[in-house]
Amino acid sequence: MSVLEIDHVDKAFGSHQVLNKMTMDVPEHCVFGFVGQNGAGKTTTMKIALGLLKADGGVVRVCGEQVTYGNSRTNRHVGYLPDVPEFYGYMRPMEYLRLCGQVTGLSSGQIATRGGELLEMVGLAGVKRRIGGFSRGMKQRLGIAQALLNQPELVICDEPTSALDPIGRKEVLDILASLKDRTTVVFSTHVLSDVERICDQVAILHGGRIALAGTIAEIKAQHRHHGFVVECANPADADRLAGAAELKSMGINTTVEGATLTVMIAQHAGGDGAPRADGAAGLVAPSVTGLAGVAPAAPSPQFSQSAGSAPSTWSGSDQAGGQLLLGALTRLDITPVRFEQMEPTLESLFAEVVK
């Protein structure tokens, strides 16, 4: 079930089209990272979902109910933390939650019970100081408690870790990560490390539309690079490996930087979608189990095996290219310090989307 559904939403400010047929679904009980550059339209999207801003077209639903501009009925399902939450500085934490609870129609008993539990969860139980003396991180944590007070099915957080120091960021992220058993969290950010750390799902907004969406594992699998990174004991070994005949196959490109060789393999190289092994007859690619961190003191035993195969997790281009690369290492008697299959990061994918 989708807690938040955004269907072909348009929004322009004057001649500037911010959202263009933007579509996004947020499943229940997940931490959903909403990523985009500054000015991409993340806050605009959230305000439309809250009924605070009128869309030019399209439909938004929260828990199956259509959001209407100016009508806060759907907000009974939602808790909201703006990027810079404002508080009455003269109040203390429990006093502020009491006010929020009264506004939302909670009873005194509900406010006392939930307020105490939430202040405990965010690390503010027993704090009697006035909010005006709180740090930015403490205010964000109090803001999260406020957003959870009405037991919402969806919590929307706009840039919740912006301007926080590393400790404050960790505290807020830990709290958000712990919430998916009780609710769904959507948080916007341009801090990609935060997304990779706690999110189950991610959507990247660019050009007014969702350019990339899914679980982080799915996105990486769909957009992964085909290649390997080999760190040799010295630059001379890296140069020798780069010049190996096995790596001259069509569709294999090598780059050397110091003692590190990067091998990129074209996904559709060769007639069968893999690099050709022509000219490498007689070279057997041994197993690479345990290659990472192999000491460069002497040839590794796995490179002297007469039989073996590349890991079963490799397939297609990686399988064939990896076999050629391992054959070259064996023939040249080079033991790598590090041997890794290339994996895309969210940062590299984001850079590709927005370039």
Image (spheres, grey):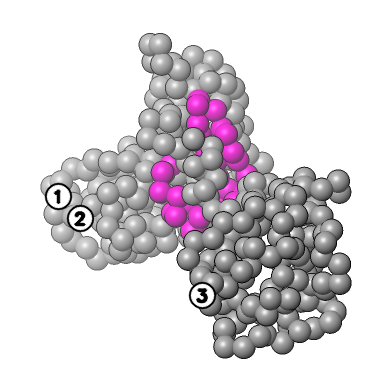
3 or 1: tag closer to the N-terminus: 1
From the viewer's perspective, is 175 left or right of 296? Answer: left
Q: Residue at x 32, y 41 (%)?
A: 83
Residue drawn at the location 27% of the way across and 49% of the way down: 163
Nearer the camera: disc 2 or disc 1: 2
Few, some or many C-alpha atoms within 10 Å of disc 1 (few <14, some 14-19, many ≥20)? few
Residue 230 higher or lower than 270, as above or below = below
Q: Residue 109: image x %, image y %?
A: 37, 53
* Amino acid type, mark 3: Asn
What label sits on residue 132 in the rendered view? 1
Three-letter amino acid code at the position of disc 2: Ser
Q: Position of residue 239 (x, y in %)?
A: 57, 66
| Residue 81 against residue 9 in the figure, above or below | below
Q: Residue at x 24, y 66 (%)?
A: 126
Amino acid on which the number 1 mark rests in the picture:
Gly
Comes first in the chain, label 3 or label 2: 2
User: Is there any visible trace of residue 224 in the rendered image?
Assistant: yes
Q: Nearer the viewer, mark 3 or mark 2?
A: 3
Pointer 2 residue = 135
Label 3 to label 1: alpha-carbon separation: 58 Å
What residue is disc 3 on?
A: 234
- Secondary structure of the residue carrying numbered label 2: loop
Q: Which residue shows up at 54% across the image and 53% down it?
A: 345
Query: Is 184 in front, or is 108?
Result: 184
How dense is the environment of label 3, judged by Cα within 10 Å: few (below 14), some, or many (20 and up)? some
User: What is the distance, in whole Å, between disc 3 and disc 2 at their CAs?
Assistant: 49 Å
| Mark-to-mark CA distance, 2 and 1 | 9 Å
Mark seen at residue 60: none
Q: Tell me if residue 213 is in the magenta stretch.
A: yes
Magenta range is: 188-216
